[in-house]
Amino acid sequence: MFPFLIALVVFVLAGIAATALLRKLPTESSDLKRGLAHLAELRWRDFAKLVLQAMQARGYQIMQDEGGPADGLPTDGGDILLQQGSQRTLLSCKYGNASVVGAQSILGLGKSAELRGAHSAIVVSPGRFDEEARRVAGQQDVELIDGATLWPEVKPFIGDDIATDP
């Protein structure tokens, strides 16, 4: 009986210690939730700048339009032409109050990319894409990057106060 009692006490104390330790550690899901909330609070221009930093980390460079802004971001919120080696890619930042991007935003993007001399397209949103948007993107060979996928890519470019606050 005595060994059973010792084992029970050790088991309970280990459980309490593990629970206390796990509550103090920031969880990946809480980090993601904070990150997505931060992305949703950004203005379009700030969001697009952050996305461009992530794209530059992937090896893309902005193709400046003649007479366009120095930072390469269109003033009308339009799509951005990127280049990686000899390949051009059209980047579309879908940002707004809607947390779910539908197929309507994806339709015609492949043709738009082709008209601008791009071989592919990327659509980025701080939210998520519905199933129809995913289906259309697959048909047009468009890469979709939702908020959960984007957050790890942009997190290094955000100040420590957002990236590490509990």
Image (spheres, rainbow, N blue to C red):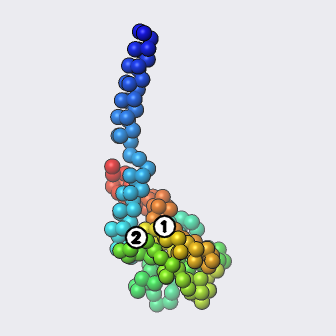
User: Would you say 41 lies left or right of 144 here?
Assistant: left
Residue 148 against residue 85 in the figure, above or below: above
Residue 164 against residue 121 in the figure, above or below: above
Residue 54 rendering spot, x and y as whole percentages: 50, 66
Q: Secondary structure at mark 2?
A: loop
Q: Amino acid at mark 1?
A: Asp
Q: Is residue 81 in view from this perspective? A: no
Q: Residues within 10 Å of mark 1 (few under 14, many from 20)?
A: many
- Image quadrant containing the N terminus: top left
Q: Is residue 108 in view from this perspective? A: yes
User: Would you say 39 lies left or right of 51 here?
Assistant: left
Name the residue located 46 percent from the left edge and 84 percent from the top edge.
Answer: 78
Q: Amino acid at mark 2?
A: Ser
Mark 2 or 1, nearer chain start: 2
Residue projecting furthest to the right: 86
Residue 53 rendering spot, x and y as whole percentages: 48, 68
Q: Quadrant of residue 162?
A: bottom left
Name the residue located 60 percent from the left edge and 89 percent from the top edge.
Answer: 115
Residue 24 against residue 9 in the figure, above or below: below
**Numbered mark located on residue 99 in the image:** 2
Tag 2 near tag 1, CB within 8 Å: no
Residue 52 rendering spot, x and y as whole percentages: 48, 71
Query: For this rendering, which residue is in front, 47 or 62?
Result: 47
Q: Quadrant of residue 94?
A: bottom left
As measured in the structure, the alpha-carbon distance from the residue carrying label 2 to the one carrying label 1 is 10 Å
Residue 145 against residue 17 in the figure, above or below: below
**Numbered mark located on residue 158 in the image:** none
Name the residue located 38 percent from the left edge and 74 percent from the top edge.
Answer: 98
Q: Secondary structure at mark 1?
A: loop
**Tag in front: 2 or 1:** 2
Name the residue located 49 percent from the left edge and 80 percent from the top edge.
Answer: 105
Q: Which residue is mark 1?
A: 146
